[in-house]
Each structure stands twice: as structure tokens, then as C-alpha cells.
Image (tube, grey):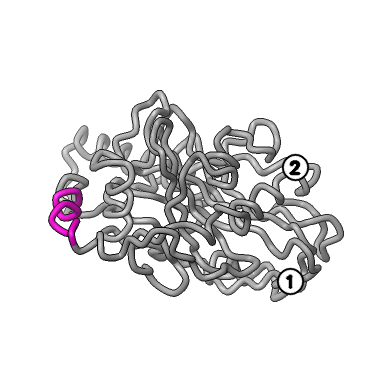
């Protein structure tokens, strides 16, 4: 299970957000320009049907989320160890300010807050910023529908339908770079930008449907029902889909998984291999058989 345990409850964080409301308002500046993002950055977006604003955050270079084992041409610097991407206090406060204090309580009908992560290399220059990837290579998440089980790999025939959506979200008029800053940066380039859902290049406009030009049967946001019914403890797997002509070919690569807790902690790590779960299940079965036999024959544990 990828649930991230935290001592901070949504309620306590919401109360903290209300107390800090006056201080937060000092950070809100209408039409404040977000520093222009770089090619190859990943963005996490949050939306909710009926709410007039989206939240989009620059998570920094995709290299930070790409295993170094893929090779230097993919820019990967990640060593495979789980790490915290965004902390609870800032993320929960920002989401509560836009979506309300119950942002994490997403009903199983999918009417609550939904989220996903997308990214894009350069749209005009090949091998920028990563030397193995041609222009319009994309990064996109896909929802896990079974806890701890990696989602099915992407099956895109081309990235050219999805790339323009990601590009206009990030760089288009009214997109991320024109968003209103909601709070101070979390770390590095991670800045919260709020967009009006009515803007053509908002998250809702570009990714408001489940397929979002990314192919059929692709739930790039968390599944609208099932085990992961909302932001609470939901898990999304990150894939790289190289552009046509990339050095390593165009086959998609699984990179890692994002987990978002109800407390507002966003972490990144790897999905355990199925064999790991099988081994754990086998060891558990052996242990239970031993306990039963010990009790049957009154064998002393010592």
C-alpha cells in the first residue's frame, strides 16, 4: 500500500490555513508572472468540477524523477530511493484555499479534486534538454487501479496530439507562466500558479477529460472510482513517451510513481516488483502454518 502516514490531519491543516489566511493573502498578486519554466520540467495539476480555479505547480526537471539506470542521454539523476516532492503544510494550505478544507475527501463518484503530472521536452529543438530525446517527447502519469500494482504501459502511436496540450498549458497565453502565484515557492522552481478554468490554456481546458488526447483507456488522473477514488492515498505511475526518432526508440518507459496522501504529502518512489508481493505472501503463509502447527503440538517457542 502506498499510503503515506502523517500526524497532520486534513482538519488541523485546514485550521492552520484559516489562521494563516491573512499572511497568505500577502503572497497573492493578481497577474503575477511565474518565472518561465524550462523544457523538460514536470507539472502537477489539480482540478475539481464546479470550482472556477485550477492549481498547477512546477515540480522541476524530469531528470529528478528519471532513473539514472536509463542512461545519461535521458538526463536521469534519480537513484531509486523514495523522496518527498512537496511538503504537507504548503500543499495542503494551497489546495484548501482553492478547493476548500475537504479537498482530500473525494467521493467515489469522482466529483472531488483530481490530479495528474505531465511534462514535455522542447517543442522546437531536438535532444533538448536531454540528448536521447527528440522534440515533443512527453511525460505523463497513469493511474494505478490496484494498490501496489503498476498500471499498464502507455500505448501511444504518437506524442504529437498530446504535446500541444502540454505546451499550451505551460507556455500559452493564460497558461502556467501567466498564472497567479498563490504562495511562496516550496523549493527550487516549485511555484503554485492558480488559473481560471475558463482560460483556454488552463489545466481544466486542456486535460478536463480522461483521455486528453493521450490515447484510449488512459486514465492519466487517478481513477474516478475503486481503491484509489481520490487524492487521498492515490498513486499515479509516471511514464516517458519518447518523440519520433529518439535515440532509444519510441517505446514507453516506466519511471516511478507519485503518491499523494490525505495530509498533503507528495512523494515519489518505485512500484515494488510483483515477485516482491508474491514473496511476502509466501513468507506470511509459511509463518501462519508454523504458528498453527506449534499451537497444535504445544511446541514451546523457545
Q: Nearer the viewer, mark 1 or mark 2?
A: 1
Where does the N terminus fall, quadrant-wise?
A: top left
**Residue 31 vs residue 175: left or right?**
left
Residue 26 in view: yes
Disc 1 secondary structure class: loop
State which region is magenta. Answer: 13-22
SS class, disc 2: loop
Between 103 and 256, which is closer to the camera in this rendering?
Answer: 103
Using the image, tell me which numbered label, if any, was put on residue 156.
2
- Magenta residue check for 21: yes
Foreground residue among 268 and 107: 107
**Rendered position, 245 above or below 71:** above
> Which residue is identified by label 1?
128
- Rendered image quadrant of residue 188: bottom left
Answer with left or right where residue 43 lies relative to residue 139: left
* Residue 214 point in image, percent of width and height: 68, 40
Reading the chain from its start, which is encountered first: label 1 or label 2? 1
Question: Residue visible at 37% across and 33% down?
Answer: 112
Counting from the top left corner in percent of width and height, residue 278 is at: 49, 43
Amino acid at each position: 500500500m502506498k499510503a503515506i502516514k502523517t500526524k497532520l490531519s486534513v482538519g488541523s491543516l485546514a485550521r492552520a490555513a484559516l489562521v494563516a489566511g491573512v499572511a497568505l493573502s500577502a503572497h497573492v498578486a493578481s497577474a503575477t508572472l511565474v518565472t518561465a519554466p524550462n523544457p523538460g520540467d514536470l507539472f502537477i495539476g489539480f482540478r475539481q468540477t464546479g470550482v472556477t480555479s485550477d492549481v498547477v505547480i512546477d515540480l522541476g526537471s524530469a531528470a529528478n524523477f528519471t532513473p539514472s539506470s536509463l542512461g545519461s542521454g535521458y538526463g536521469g539523476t534519480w537513484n531509486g530511493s523514495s523522496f518527498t516532492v512537496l511538503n504537507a503544510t504548503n500543499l495542503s494550505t494551497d489546495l484548501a484555499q482553492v478547493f476548500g478544507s475537504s479537498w482530500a475527501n473525494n467521493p467515489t463518484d469522482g466529483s472531488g479534486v483530481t490530479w495528474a503530472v505531465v511534462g514535455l521536452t522542447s517543442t522546437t529543438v531536438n535532444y533538448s534538454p536531454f540528448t536521447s530525446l527528440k522534440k515533443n517527447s512527453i511525460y505523463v502519469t497513469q493511474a494505478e487501479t490496484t494498490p501496489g500494482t503498476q498500471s499498464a504501459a502507455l500505448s501511444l502511436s504518437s506524442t504529437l496530439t498530446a504535446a500541444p496540450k502540454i505546451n499550451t498549458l505551460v507556455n500559452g497565453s493564460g497558461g502556467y507562466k501567466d498564472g497567479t502565484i498563490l504562495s511562496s515557492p516550496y523549493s527550487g522552481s516549485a511555484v503554485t500558479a492558480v488559473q481560471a478554468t475558463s482560460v483556454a490554456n488552463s489545466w481544466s481546458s486542456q486535460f478536463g477529460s480522461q483521455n486528453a488526447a493521450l490515447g484510449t483507456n488512459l486514465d492519466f488522473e487517478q481513477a474516478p472510482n475503486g481503491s484509489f477514488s481520490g487524492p487521498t492515498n492515490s498513486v499515479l505511475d509516471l511514464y516517458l513517451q519518447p518523440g519520433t526518432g529518439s535515440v532509444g526508440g519510441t517505446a514507453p518507459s516506466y519511471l516511478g510513481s507519485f503518491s499523494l496522501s490525505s495530509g498533503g504529502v507528495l512523494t515519489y518512489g518505485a512500484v515494488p516488483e510483483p515477485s516482491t508481493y508474491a514473496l511476502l505472501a509466501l513468507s506470511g503463509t509459511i509463518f501462519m502454518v508454523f504458528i498453527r502447527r506449534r499451537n497444535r503440538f504445544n511446541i514451546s517457542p523457545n
